[in-house]
Amino acid sequence: MKNIYSIVFILLFSSAIFAQGEVLTNRTVMEMTKAGLSTEVITDKIRKTATRFDVTAVALIELKNAGVEDEVIRLMMERADSVLPGQPPRTLDAVGYSENEPFDVETGEERRTESVQISPREAIEMARTIAFHKSSAQPSRQNLEKALLRNPDFIKMNLTILRYKEEADLFVEIGFVSGSWITHRYVYRIFDRRSGAVLAAGETTSWGSLAENLARHISRSLKQIKDG
């Protein structure tokens, strides 16, 4: 009899641990929708479970195309907004990738570039947020952001600057070109976060003002992509 009680306790304890570790993602919501679960059931599950939702413009379109109801999508956006302030920063390597990339955080499998197929122009037009990662000490984040917010081309893009690239539609890697101690060359690459595609790349120098130079080149690259 003691053995039976022990087995039941272990099963219940294991189930509790498993439930605590469950995290809902866009994929699981789409799978629940595909399975025919009602809106009430899905929203109740979202409210009671830890979540990690992608609510970028591209992700919302994907959810809608998968048949997810607007009420569910709105709740997903609310949950995503509610956890952003408390999310810890991710560990980044020297070139700006998080420790989970290029692997899918939902499955652990290697990411496939064919998961999202959009043109650079579409990626820019759908983007609402942008973030920056520097592998060099200069320029300071504050100076770069100030320079961007003064740049007419960047202002017209109507992009909100975020702190962490994992939360942004677009992100820009900035790095110093090794060995260019005389010319002071810096390179940048603009990525569409969801697809991982490189949308533009370029370089500038620190002569004059590195922050202003980068802001001008990055803004010009974004404008050229959007204008086609």
Image (cartoon, rainbow, N blue to C red):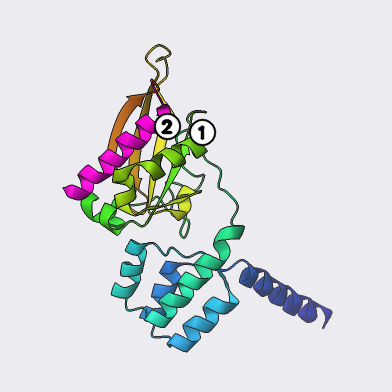
User: Which residue position is annotated with label 2?
Assistant: 211
Write down the residue under mark 1: 140
In this picture, residue 37 sits left or right of residue 191: right
Q: Mark 1: which amino acid? A: Ser
Asked whether, in this view, residue 197 is left or right of residue 135, the answer is left
Say above or below: 115 vs 213: below
Question: Tags 1 and 2 in contact by the CB under 8 Å rule?
Answer: yes
- Quick one: which residue is furthest to the left in this view? 228
* Highlighted magenta segment, given as a residue range: 208-228
- The extreme top residue here reads 182
Point out residue 84 in the picture as x, y percentages from the top left corner: 55, 60
Q: Residue at x 43, y 68 (%)?
A: 26
Asked if residue 211 lies in the magenta stretch, the reply is: yes
- Which residue is rendered at x = 24% and y = 45% of the image? 223
Residue 216 rendering spot, x and y as whole percentages: 32, 35
For the question of whether residue 137 can be seen, the reply is yes
Outermost residue toward the right in this view? 2
Asked whether the viewer can see residue 198, the reply is no
The part of the image, by quadrant, that contains residue 57 is: bottom left
**Sequence-earlier tag: 1 or 2:** 1
How many discs appear? Answer: 2
Label 2: element kind: helix
Q: In front: 39, or 141?
A: 141
